[in-house]
Amino acid sequence: MNLKNADSGPVPEPLIALAGNPNTGKSTIFNGLTGLKQHTGNWPGKTVAQTKGQYRHGNRTINLVDLPGTYSLLAGSPEEQVARDFICFAAPDVTIVVADAGCLERHLNLVLQVMEITPKTILCVNLIDEAEKKKIRIDYEKLHTLLGIPVVPTAARNKKGLGALKNTADDLIAGKIKPSPRLPAYDEPVENALQTLGKSLQRFYSGGLNPRWLALRLLDGDPALRAELKESLRKNPKPGIAGAEQKKLIAAFLQEAASYRRKLGPDLRDRVVRSLYQRAEEIVAGVVRKPPVKVADWNNRIDNIVTSRLYGYPIILLLLGFIFWLTIAGANYPSELLARILFGLEEKLATTGQALGVPAWLDGLLVKGIYRSLAWVVSVMLPPMAIFFPLFTFLEDLGFLPRVAFNLDKFFKKAGAHGKQSLTMCMGFGCNAVGVTACRIIDSARERLIAILTNNFVPCNGRFPTLFIMASFFSVALLGRTNSLLASALVLLVILVGVGATLLCSLLLSKTILRGIPSTFTLELPGYRWPKIGTLLIRSILDRTLFVLGRAVTIAAPAGAFVWLLANIQSGEGSLLTQLAGWLQGFGNLLGMDGYIILAFILGLPANEIVLPILVMGYLSGSYLLEPESVEAFHALFFANGWTWLTALNVMIFALLHFPCGTTLLTIRKETLGGKWTFLSAFLPTVAGIILCLLITQVVRFFRLV
Amino acid sequence: MELTALPIGKSATIAGLNAKGPTRRRLLDLGMIPATTIEAVRKSPAGDPVAYKVRGTIIALRSEESRLIRVHQ
């Protein structure tokens, strides 16, 4: 019985930890149990930090923590340390280890390691639906006997077995199930050492750590763990043993461990891992039946095409291009409709305001300032996001991104970057702040910094709408009408520029201030999984679309008011906004843009989503008197301000290459603990953007292309 | 021979690891211990990394790592 639960106060809240290899559907189980919408990608190692959630069972609340996905608890990567430390030191009431039914042998390695730490372990064999399709049969009863811990088969995607999992956890917490884990046996010298050390330990230690496991870790000599183990020894003396006596016993014990360590030799780790896998092999031989003939392997056939020399790269480009095309072509009509409704409402609001006698300045601030920018954000950003995010999530959940990483890895290696950088880069497509945080999964400090500094080179959710809208305008300016094909090709090109800039900048950094060689990298290519479309839609709309829209709306409202004020406070020759834009005009013109655009990028620092709304507000506050009521009207607004296709192109490039948003900058500061790196992360892309826009503009103007 | 020399589509048995430190631990944890069967499954279109099947999982390794794995056919 856990001491925490012994109080007679309010019903105690048990704590359950969820561990498992990456890509075992661990996060799906977490979502299934808690109902909390937490994103699960079919990508190994998605969870960087722990995600927490709760569920009700019977009359109490159970806390659940989703630990980072790890293959083992021994290798000492950041993810593994987080997972191991949580299981050891946070002492959860139950630890559920999720394993893949189709690949039990490798997963049992982790299960056995967790069992060594805590007997209160449940093995959750997930993905049994996939295993059944492959005609793999598992004897769960025998598996339970061989391991000595509860075993629950689940198919979390279809919510199968989750009830049983909750009940089993409950029984284990209540003590109705008494686990008697059958731990792996090591070779004789190791076992002898463990027994002697375990006995010495019991003389003075009363902490919660399993003596056998503690001794094994000391023999293994993991430096990252040593300090924490010593701390636990010091803090948990047996009653009656204190002060000098305790110190003496600990010192003697550590010396004993060190001498055993020398005797056992340097290959202890190999022997330990070998024993773990041998035990896993034995268990699997007894409980798993696989068909003798191979069932048709679709994964293999798909991968033969997706990673082939001939089609590997074109497929990635075509797929991304197709998604962009669907987004641009599909967003046109709903955008139009939303604009008509929302801007129609604006007039009504204004008339109602006047009828109620609201003062003109307040009416202007609320309607022309706040409402108008909100209406713009919703009508222009919502449709492309509602199409793009589900499509991108689909690719993610399908398991396509690891193939992208597989195909691109050589370039990252050449750039001196870590292989995981392609993963953090892909997460940057969602949100750069998230991408920067995700860089924690990179062990080497040098490579982590490179990944953090270059994350902003891929456009985030907040910048995609700008890209889509500008690309549409580009096609209108060039051809006289919207051409979705041209527009999507342009967005694709900009993304390629972003990836190119990422590689180039990584190379530059790894050859100059962050010199070094790439460290170890292994990438799992998980099986493809057809996503549950319903869940995918709900998740991508709720978690991504509405999240980004919500953020945009929250920031756009005050920003709209601020810009309206700037546009309406007169000083000297014109409004503050006109004057500010005037100062920036020369610089903007040099880059093929104008003062208002540069100002919009600067004022858009809090969030990239509001750059275009600010720009439109700026233009509308000037001499141009158009009532915005459709997307064409916005195009007309841009034309009236002297835009050409070159302007749109430069806005796209500058949207891709400029300082990160405020949130991302704060995150970088937090992650790198330094103003210097934060400054560099803003300086690098901005300089790149200025140079590229300048070059393009001057070349285009030199040849009189516009 | 080194794992890098294993042709695509062929299997071999792991003889040992020449890796040290974290790389060695990482490879061990993926189940790459002596006597384990490993199959070279596919090459990246750029030639590196190469994906290997080991203990039912497909793992891609850069040549820097696969060079450290000794195998015999």
Image (tube, rainbow, N blue to C red):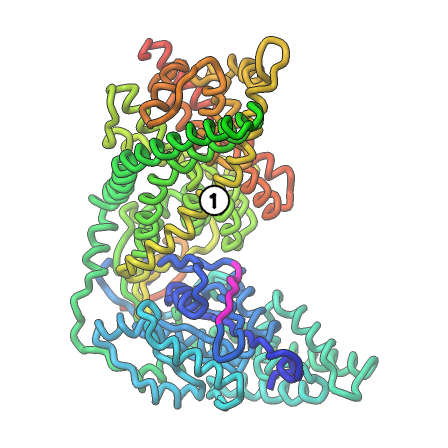
- Quadrant location of the C terminus of chain A in the rendered image: top left
Whether residue B28 appears in this view of the structure is no
Spot occupied by residue A12 in the image (x, y as percentages of width and height) = 60, 78
- Quadrant location of the N terminus of chain A in the rendered image: bottom right
Q: Is residue A625 above or below residue A359?
A: above
* Amino acid at circle 1: Gly
Classify mark 1: helix, strand or loop.
helix
Residue A505 included in the magenta stretch of the image: no
Left/right placement of residue A513 relative to residue A145 reads: right
Residue displayed at 39% across by 22% down: A627
Which residue range is magenta in the image?
A49-55
- The subunit letter for the residue under badge 1 reads A
Which residue matches tag 1? A550
Spot occupied by residue A578 in the image (x, y as percentages of width and height) = 54, 15
Q: Is residue A72 above or below residue A506?
A: below
| Quarter of the image where one finds residue A82 | bottom right
